[in-house]
Image (spheres, grey):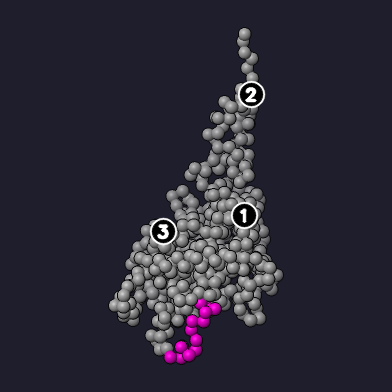
């Protein structure tokens, strides 16, 4: 199979650093507002450390997302016309506020709700037309190999009854997986009973796909497995890291919230359900909830076991709210009130204590003296920033990735971003130093336009002129 050539990534490979960095985003429909809020905070912390041009794609070796998390992944890693991420993290939440009410239009009044119920008995609850339209409009012609860092987005092929993982690593070996990012994101967010399955062809292969949450609603383990496979196959980007060296992994996994703590279902209810009851109950789909939450929890438990066994639990951060209730726990109640409340839940989640799975009980419990999720994200931001700088200092490549030079073609572009060598003698040496010396944010001390004003100000003092009498 023909290999697909990918452009250079905007992050130096792990072989030049100490860590392998992974960001994972769960599925959950409109509840994607919760991780969007968390990610905006993380990116703002990175900007505090490395400047306003810092973007999440500059720091993570892999960004993985399932369902709504897959859409967020695509938005964070698709390139704009300047080769920078199409969306800042802070732009994801407004996208949800604007587009979710159109993707999941709410029927008003009793007759509207009855029509929606009848529709859901004979087909998907929503037509999916706007869902497909807006994703195609936003992501355009970008293909999987174009993403600014490696991505892993799971889907499920309903024809072959097996997962299809769209991975930047796999696409280098198999061009048939190099689908458009819009088709991938439409597929991974096509939740059964809510949105129609998605069919498309790519080269000689056809895809019949539904929501990635069916396969891996928490895609963190899929991402770790993809990286481990690269290490086993001796990908030079990961040398000399060993396949089971999970102590070198730095993983941030962000959930979209669950109703686990509120216990909205029980055996007495479920005992009375037939096909309809399992598909529709209290505005949710119990069958979908059970499958997605079970897989998410198993992934969290498995990763926690591995990291704790290797005494590397500090390298794994799982942020999840288990106390959603009512419309907050649905995937499609896209009213302004509910969306605003979900955003508020995301903000409050930042202030909650860091929690970790108790391996004996299987329950998530706050860590003693672990601080808040906000504190943990600040710590991880510093680790990510330090790792990025370490890699750039060790990389033998003279080429500087756009991530390290921020906005190369915007107002922040500087001459030092483009030249392998800047040489100067005499006054040219002074100009060279001014153009290349770093400021406190590790950007050039002087913009070229500042050099000209430096000369009129200082040359008369360096070379004072004697006045004639």
Residue at x 63%, y 81% (from the top left corner): 361
Q: Which mark is residue 4?
A: none
Q: Is residue 405 magenta?
A: no
Q: Is residue 241 visible?
A: yes
Q: Is residue 35 above or below residue 214?
A: above
Q: Determine contact: label 3, label 1, CB under 8 Å.
A: no
Q: Secondary structure at mark 2?
A: helix
Residue nearest the observer in this picture, 220 or 258: 258
- 465 with respect to 257 (left or right): right
Instruction: Read off the residue under disc 2.
Output: 461
Q: Which mark is residue 385?
A: 1
Q: Secondary structure at mark 1?
A: helix
Mark 2 closeness class: few <14, some 14–19, many ≥20 residues within 10 Å: few
Which of the 4 quarters of the picture holds residue 114? bottom left
- 40 with respect to 331 (left or right): right
Q: Position of residue 105 (x, y in %)?
A: 35, 69
Instruction: Read off the residue under disc 3.
Output: 139
Tally of numbered tags: 3
Dot in front, 3 or 1: 1
* Start-end of magenta stretch: 259-272
Q: Is residue 223 visible?
A: no
Q: Position of residue 248 (x, y in %)?
A: 66, 64
Quick one: label 3 or label 2, which is nearer the N terminus?
3
* Separation of marks 3 and 2 at Cα, in angstroms: 55 Å
Q: Determine contact: label 3, label 2, CB under 8 Å.
A: no
Q: Position of residue 335 (x, y in %)?
A: 39, 68
Residue at x 52%, y 42% (from the top left corner): 413
Q: Is residue 260 magenta?
A: yes
* Separation of marks 3 and 1 at Cα, in angstroms: 28 Å
Residue at x 33%, y 81% (from the top left corner): 121
Q: Is residue 147 above or below residue 432?
A: below
Quick one: label 3 or label 1, which is nearer the N terminus?
3
């Amino acid at each position: 199979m023909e290999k697909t050539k990918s452009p250079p990534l905007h992050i130096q490979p792990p072989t030049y650093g100490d860590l392998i960095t992974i960001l994972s985003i769960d599925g959950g429909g409109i509840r994607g507002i919760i991780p969007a809020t968390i990610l905006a905070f993380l990116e703002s912390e990175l900007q505090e450390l490395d400047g306003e041009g810092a973007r999440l794609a500059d720091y993570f070796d892999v960004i993985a997302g399932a369902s709504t998390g897959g859409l967020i992944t695509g938005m964070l890693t698709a390139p704009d016309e300047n080769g920078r991420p199409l969306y800042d993290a802070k732009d994801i939440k407004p996208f949800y506020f604007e587009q979710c009410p159109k993707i999941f239009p709410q029927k008003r009044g009793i007759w509207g709700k009855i029509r929606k119920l009848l529709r859901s008995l004979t087909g998907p609850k929503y037509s999916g037309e706007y869902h497909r339209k807006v994703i195609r409009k936003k992501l355009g012609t970008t293909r999987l190999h174009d993403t600014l860092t490696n991505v892993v987005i799971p889907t499920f092929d309903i024809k072959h009854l097996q997962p299809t993982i769209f991975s930047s690593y796999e696409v280098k070996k198999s061009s048939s997986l190099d689908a458009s990012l819009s088709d991938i994101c439409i597929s991974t967010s096509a939740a059964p009973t809510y949105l129609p399955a998605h069919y498309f062809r790519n080269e000689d292969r056809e895809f019949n796909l539904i929501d990635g949450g069916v396969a891996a609603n928490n895609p963190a383990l899929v991402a770790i497995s993809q990286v481990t496979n690269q290490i086993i196959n001796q990908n030079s980007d990961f040398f000399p890291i060993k396949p089971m060296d999970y102590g070198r992994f730095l993983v941030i996994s962000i959930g979209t919230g669950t109703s686990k703590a509120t216990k909205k279902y029980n055996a007495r209810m479920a005992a009375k359900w037939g096909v309809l009851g399992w598909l529709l109950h209290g505005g949710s789909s119990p069958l979908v909830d059970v499958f997605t939450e079970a897989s998410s929890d198993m992934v969290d438990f498995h990763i926690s076991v591995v990291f704790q066994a290797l005494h590397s639990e500090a390298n794994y951060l799982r942020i999840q709210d288990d106390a959603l209730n009512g419309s907050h726990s649905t995937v499609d109640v896209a009213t302004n009130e509910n969306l605003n409340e979900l955003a508020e839940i995301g903000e409050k989640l930042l202030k909650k204590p860091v929690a970790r799975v108790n391996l004996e009980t299987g329950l998530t419990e706050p860590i003693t003296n672990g601080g808040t999720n906000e504190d943990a994200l600040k710590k991880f931001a510093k680790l990510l920033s330090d790792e990025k700088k370490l890699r750039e200092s060790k990389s033998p490549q003279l080429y500087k990735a756009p991530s390290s030079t921020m906005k190369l073609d915007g107002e922040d572009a500087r001459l030092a971003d483009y030249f392998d060598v800047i040489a100067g003698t005499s006054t040219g040496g002074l100009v060279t130093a001014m153009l290349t010396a770093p400021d406190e944010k590790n950007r050039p001390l002087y913009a070229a336009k500042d050099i000209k004003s430096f000369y009129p100000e200082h040359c008369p003092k360096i070379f004072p002129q004697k006045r004639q009498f």
